[in-house]
Amino acid sequence: MARSLGLPARTVSGLAHSGSTFGGHAWVEVWVGEWIELDPTWGTDFVDATHIRNNSSALVTSAALNLIDVEILEANRMVAEFQKTPKALAEHLIKVMPEGDRSDLEAAIDLETLTDEYMGAGAWKGLNESERDQMSSAYRRVLGEILDGYREADPTPNDMRLLHVEVKDDRAEALCLDARDDMLVRLRFRQREGAWHLVEVVQVDTGLHIAAEMTAPSIQSIEAARAGRKEAPAGLSDFVRAVLLFESDPAKSAEIIERGLKAKPGDQNLRYLKALALMASDKKDESLKLLAELANEQPAHAHAVFTLAGQTADTQPAAAIELYKKYTSLEPFDPRGYRELAVLYENNQQIALAEANYRKQIVTDTVDVSGYLSLIRLLALNDRIPEIAPVMVEADRYVGTDEDLMATVLDDLYEYADLDDAQKLADSEPQRMRTSVGANLALANIYLRDDRPREALTFINRAVQIDPKVAEAHISLSEAYIKLSRLPDALKAANHAVSLDQNNAWAHRQRARVLARLGRTKEAISAIEKALELDPESVEFIKLDPELKSLKKIPAFQKLLQDHKTPNDPK
């Protein structure tokens, strides 16, 4: 198959360990700039230490003639630190899953424990060699699915966050938030021989149980063979296929779900997935009806309640509030319910209730800075400045080393706060303002928003004094000078911003704005061309910029905009 696609490939032979013994086996190497090993028989895109290659085939021949026998006499199992408690294992997994660390994930998932989990206690010991091969293949499918689903190209420390851990005897469950998709994940653990092992990963918002789904085909095959039935190898379930097709082809996903519902008409997860597929297919009324049915059943489908609340928040905020309250009773450790409740209460001017729910959001997801920012904004907008300092001190513990909390707070206030509120907050944090370029620029932007450029210059100049090499400070300086009609000074500041950062599209755009006001048309268009080269999406800002209106009738400018037309722009 590889060669049919023009990829060089070759067979590798040797021994492979099935879980009990070594036996003759063959797998494949494919050239993709380097030789990588695959095992089509076991369905893996990697080959690990269970495979021993032997170019001369001597090992395979000896094994076939029963001339060698490999026996494991002793295996000293050491319990890794991260497997000593469920919390330690959960904290470790939310770190290594985004990183795609296969070795640590392999350590956390034990084949015997996984088999016993889905086939019954002691099942592994009762499997023959062929059956163990099948469960080994299932184990690799589980590994691959988790790695493919949660690996991140550029992982950050809080991609996944631990919300809560519950332990009961030899079982435990960790609730996590996958911040990249704003989705819940449940990690289920089982203790065996003093170590905790991962036995399931549940995508809570869709109801997908990864380990159960990936082991099911092997278990079905084993059970069919034991019963003397000849069956075709089981493939993916209708539920998994529907989930995989949900975004790319919602109509096909809905069709598969309907087939699954014929066999399981009351299955809540399938019906919830159907509601999502209907929504994606622009059948909102049907979707809302099904979501309402699921939300009112006993027991209610928690994520149907959450989704229904989100769909009704704009048109029926009072009903959405009741739904979110119900959701928080069903999922009390999910910060998203409190977050959405707080927003609705704030929009309805129920400030005390909004504050209470922002604080609950913080308690359930302590490391998420957005909860602190929302609470700070609420306090600032309601003239409660003295109460903000302790919230900021607490938030400081979770802000990244390259982030500026004060700048972020003032940036957040740009859309919501009166100038007086922003200035009061800045005055309450003199130490932060003395050291933060971003905070001074954010406050200056609020002054510029209110058309008060002279006062803005005070904070822009302070930012320049803190760090004269920050291009954004000189861009803001140029903007203030434009508003004051000091165009030569504005051009000087824009030119300096470009000299500090040649790849700053904003700096080139600011330079174009000044040049356009000065009537230097060709230079302005050249600067816009450079800005669009660096940031094609800035075309929308350029189209609407009043400082560039003098260029709108010039053919070269029109052509430049046409060449950078966005896909959704009909003009």
Image (spheres, rainbow, N blue to C red):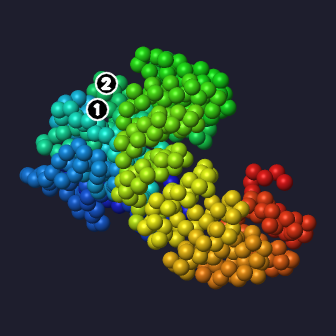
Image location of residue 4, percent across then percent down: 55, 57
The picture quadrant where one finds residue 534 is: bottom right
Please give the name of the residue rendered at 78% of the width and 59% of the height, measured from the top-left corner.
Answer: 544
Query: 137 or 196: nearer the eye?
Result: 196
Q: Crowdedness of circle 1 by 10 Å Cα count: few (<14), some, many (20+)?
A: some
Image location of residue 392, percent across then percent down: 41, 55
Q: How far apart are marks 2 and 1 (CA)?
A: 21 Å
Numbered mark located on residue 228 in the image: 2
For the residues carrying marks 2 and 1, which lies nearer the camera in this image?
1
- The quadrant of the rendering that contains the C terminus is bottom right
Numbered mark located on residue 118 in the image: 1
Numbered mark located on residue 454 in the image: none
Please give the name of the residue rendered at 69% of the width and 68% of the height, measured from the top-left corner.
Answer: 453
Please give the name of the residue rendered at 58% of the width and 70% of the height, measured from the top-left corner.
Answer: 459
Measured along the vertical axis of the image, is residue 273 above or below residue 143?
above
Q: Crowdedness of circle 2 by 10 Å Cα count: few (<14), some, many (20+)?
A: few
Amino acid at the residue labelled 2: Gly
Query: 497 or 62: nearer the eye?
Result: 497
Q: For mark 1, give the secondary structure.
A: helix
Can residue 98 be seen by looking at this rendering?
Answer: no
Image location of residue 3, percent across then percent down: 52, 60
Image location of residue 376, percent across then percent down: 47, 50
